[in-house]
Amino acid sequence: MFVIKKSSYLFSISTFLFYSMASYAFNSHIAVGTYLEKNSFAPLLLTSHNNGLTWAHNKNISGLPPHLGNLSIDYINCDASTCVAGGQSQIGQTIHPVLLVSNDKGNTWSYINKISGFPSQADKLNIKAIRCTENSCIVAGQLHTNQKDMPMLLVSTNHHTSWSLIPNIAGLPQTYYASISSLSCTEHTCIAVGEYIINKSKIPLLLRSIDGGQSWSLKSIPALPADIWRSYLDAVECSGNTCIIGGSYRTIKNSFTEKLLLAVSHDKGASWKLIETITDFPQNVDFNSPIKYIHCKQNQCVTSGQYDENSMTSYPLILTSADNGDSWSAVKTISGLSHFQQFSLNTGPMDCSGSTCVITGMKVNEPYHGNPSPLLLISQNHGHSWSAINLVLGFPYRQVQEINTYAVHCKDMTCMVSGSYLDKLTHDATKTVPMLLVSQTKGLTWTFNLPLNQTVGELHNLAIINEV
């Protein structure tokens, strides 16, 4: 109870500071996830119309069947006042997709009761991305059915009213495993990336649609080695005519050496160029998800990931481009994170607003001994230099065993991080608690927000709706 009171008190201080900023603009925020209610998990839908100062918990979902159990909302995307949230429900061994639509900035929600072409028997479903425009929307991820994993693309082209599963992808060979990890759209062109297996080799999956997601085709990346063996694409970002994809690969000849995979397109994904040289790139290190997220605005692009310096120390890998992705350099140092300090970390989501960028995650200053703390990296010059924020006001550092950050969004002065932490109740018992981290100063200072008073659950994703 002490931590909750302390957090509430510190958050009231940030409220006072917030209202002292006369030029501040209010935006609506929606956080989604899952929480434990009456021995079953229910969808968690939180809405704030004052930049995260207060939150409303929306429990009523129109049309939601009462028999659906263990619901989780994993992703959300908003366009204007309309939002689409996606997740899953489990009944026995069968997984059902859950799509929710709001037309009033997240205040009320309705359940989509039919997805044309979706199999009646599915035992695994992962939603990795949702992208919506005024009329159309795409939900992307992975679906397991009939003993195989297939890329999942759910599409609506009539204001999110009716939905269908894309049954075929042109050029994609028959495979027992394929998955989509990220999706980005520019106008009517969309790019989805992930991985698939063919002849026992894991190959980068690169899909393109030029009709708003109604049909898709497989694309190739030139200059990749012919003996590529284990590879994947984790991230894609499209802005204007430029699209950038990132991941890693290994070859049969050098099966123990993971190499960075970074490619750029300036014709909306019709053709691609592999980036083969990166200035100041770290040498003799082991990669661990080298590119997880990509963000581009105008000519400025940033990627975030991580690498292992040795068996005890991980370090963020941040790449920047100032010429629309044609040339890249690695950030050599991060203020507040020493290369000589032993710590492990897991870099998470990244977002940028204007010249401000934020990377989140978890770090442990003394591996195997220290308590975890939030990883918050801030840049105010389009990602070219970075500093670590080492204090979150009100965060229960001594109670935390693990931290998961699933999403970060920045708009104007406000940045938010959604996730969860593992609360150490006793030496033998823990519970997962939903978590929000909020900054009203472009990421320079942060406060901890516990939106549901120690409820078991997680906040998986965030969305921002611009107020006019």
Image (cartoon, rainbow, N blue to C red):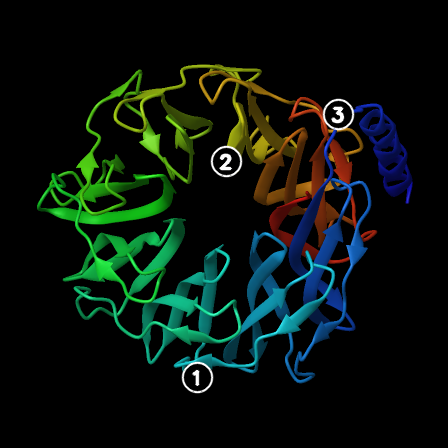
- The 10 Å Cα crowd at callout 2, few under 14, some 14 to 19, many 20 or more, is many
| Res 92 → quadrant | bottom right
Estimate how packed mark 3 is, as few (under 14), some (14 to 19) or many (20 or more) residues with alpha carbons within 10 Å. few
Marks 1 and 3, how far apart at CA:
53 Å
Label 1 is placed on what type of residue?
Gln
Task: Give the percent coordinates (x, y) of residue 17.
Answer: 83, 25
Residue sitting at x 70%, y 38%: 437
Q: Which mark is residue 121?
A: 1
The answer to whether residue 18 of the structure is visible from this angle is yes
Q: Secondary structure beneath disc 2?
A: strand
Could you tell me which secondary element the residue under label 1 belongs to? loop
Residue named by callout 2 = 347
Q: Nearer the viewer, mark 1 or mark 3?
A: 3
- In the rendered view, tell whether residue 446 sits above or below residue 417: above
Q: Which residue is mark 3?
A: 23
User: Which residue is at 20% across, 66% downward?
Assistant: 170
* Mark 1 vs 3, N-terminal side: 3
Residue at the location (67% across, 42% down)?
Answer: 401
Residue type at mark 2: give it: Thr
The answer to which of 432 and 293 lies nearer the viewer is 293
